[in-house]
Image (spheres, rainbow, N blue to C red):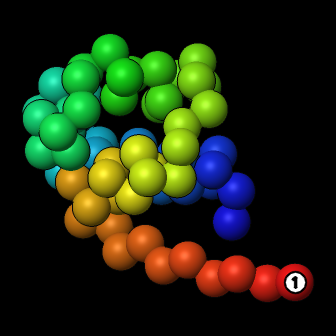
Amino acid sequence: MTKNQIVKRIIKARKTKGWTTVASAQKASVSQPTWWRVENGKVDPTWELLFQMCKAVGIKAVVTLQE
């Protein structure tokens, strides 16, 4: 799964919960502008940030490494 696909799932989960970017960002302990930039493709988020965002909206993130 690409970062873009993960972001799309995060957006869907946030909207399903009826949360604003402000509320979601607070739950993830990131700034609202950072959350907005990730959702709108303005930055390439780190994996750590994506995991924080997933956790905030209730998505379980699992990492699989392949060769």
Type of the residue with mark 1: Glu
Locate residue 64, reporting x and y percent.
Answer: 63, 82
Residue 25: image quadrant is top left
Locate residue 24, reporting x and y percent.
Answer: 19, 39
Q: Nearer the viewer, residue 50 or 21?
A: 50
Q: Residue at x 48, y 79 (%)?
A: 62
Q: Is residue 46 visible?
A: yes
In the displayed structure image, the side of residue 3 where residue 47 appears, left or right: left
Locate residue 22, reporting x and y percent.
Answer: 16, 25
Q: Residue at x 32, y 15 (%)?
A: 33
In the displayed structure image, the side of residue 55 where residue 7 appears, left or right: right
Q: Is residue 26 above or below residue 43?
A: below
Q: Residue at x 28, y 46 (%)?
A: 14
In the displayed structure image, the side of residue 52 where residue 18 appears, left or right: left
In the displayed structure image, the side of residue 39 where residue 64 appears, left or right: right
Q: Is residue 20 visible?
A: no
Q: Residues within 10 Å of mark 1 (few under 14, many from 20)?
A: few
Q: Which residue is mark 1?
A: 67
- Quadrant where the C terminus lies? bottom right
- Quadrant where the N terminus lies? bottom right
Q: Is residue 31 above or below residue 63?
A: above
Element at label 1 = loop
Total numbered badges shown on the rendered structure: 1
Locate residue 47, reporting x and y percent.
Answer: 52, 53
Q: Residue at x 79, y 84 (%)?
A: 66
Q: Residue furthest right?
A: 67
